[in-house]
Amino acid sequence: MTTTVIDHIGLLITNDSALGEGPLGQRRNASVVIEDDRVVSVGDAGQIADKRIDAEGACVLPGFVDSHTHLVFAGDRSEEFTARMSGQPYDGGGIRVTTEATRSTSTAELDRLVRLRLAEAHRAGTTTIEIKSGYGLNVEDEARSLDIARRHTSETTFLGAHLVPSEYVGNEDDYVDLVCGDMLAASAPYAKWIDAFCESGAFDAEQSRAVLEAGAAVGLTGRLHGNQLGPGPGVQLAVECGCASVDHCTYLTDADINALADSNTVATFLPAADFSTKQPYADARRVLDAGVTVALASNCNPGSSYTTSISFCIAIAVRDMGMTIDEAIQAVTLGGAAALRRDDIGRLTPGSAGHAVILDAPSHHHLAYRPGVPLIRDTIGPLGH
Ligand code: NIG
């Protein structure tokens, strides 16, 4: 057993009000003792251990939980992004471009690309990550994408219902049958979650419900893409189906917010997608004020959000979505954990995972105050299962 102490922490965020001040459980001049991969104690500075990491007075917080990514893909869509910056709208149609590139890339190369993206996310402070399929869109390539994702994380999501692939345009219901039948059967062994893109131009409420119900029948819990490009049925459907999370939530009605408030479905905001697609930012304040549990995630994908930076998401949430810095920090730690229905991550408390971020800054406020600056000095704990 190896004991590691992170010592001389100027400001520690534990996310447990029993361990420190306020909802973030903040402690000054603190240390965290980790045995193997678990926190065993949180205390004052000056602990003894086999291995000592000197935080030199910096701020330490729980590792980020990125609960929404699409990391298994090949190809490049920078031209689509550039066209958007000149006024082209985003409609999700580029998913087919990435599908073509992904299908024609070898498994070894896809795995290499995933590893590079994971290394980038880890350097940026992420210690738990969810990865979706969704750029295979046939039986073999969806299962292959999830097999690759599963090598790196237990938080894998089957997203065969990302978009109807070119060969099924005009036969959408046949494609939904395939997703709910052979594709699900081949993918389920590698997946924990099931998801659908419930949006006009992708899958309607009835089709999305069929996918979520087929997943539930084989033990996969739902999560849903909803209300990204306009108001729609996604949020209500996610709540009705008991999804762990409904993601995007850019356009919410009062009824959507009330439904979320009465549920245990997390509202996950993906502000880097709104940045890259020039959508308005979600009004997180309204949602938080209604008592909804909120997460923030990167949505790393080649089309709508090619970033692994949770710090970037925090900065947008604080600048443009009405979140306080403390709420944004909670959303990328505890919120992400709730979206994955986990209580062992997103906090630094005895028994939790020993996943931490050491900042090159005296407080977590700097994550919004110094946007674009690489403030993650060290990420403690692997990014993986
Ligand atoms: O979450 N909205 C659907 N899926 C992704 C985008 C995928 C793409 O454009 O390649 C998202 O934004």
Image: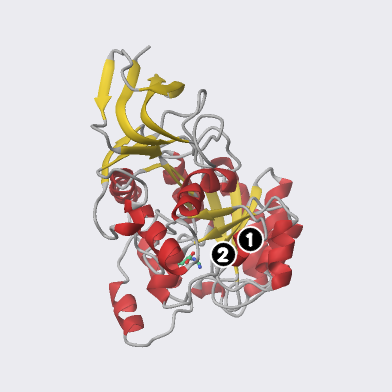
The location of residue 304, given as percent across then percent down, is: 41, 69
Quadrant for residue 294, please give it: bottom right
Q: Can you identify the residue that label 1 sits on?
A: 289
The location of residue 300, given as percent across then percent down, is: 40, 58
Query: Is the shortest distance between ligand 1 and the CB of mark 2 under 8 Å?
Result: no
Q: Can you identify the residue that label 2 sits on?
A: 285
- Could you tell me which residue is drawn at 45 percent across and 40 percent down? 153
Q: Say what amino acid the circle numbered 1 marks.
A: Asp
Q: Is residue 118 above or below residue 84?
A: above
Q: Is residue 127 above or below residue 216?
A: above
The location of residue 363, given as percent across then percent down, is: 34, 45
Would residue 210 be visible to someone looking at this image?
A: no
Count of marks placed on residues: 2
Tell me if label 2 and label 1 are in contact, CB under 8 Å.
yes
- Identify the element where label 1 is drawn: helix
- Could you tell me which residue is drawn at 50 percent across and 37 percent down? 21
- Judging depth in this view, the residue of 153 and 39 nearest the camera is 39
Q: Quadrant of the N terminus?
A: top left
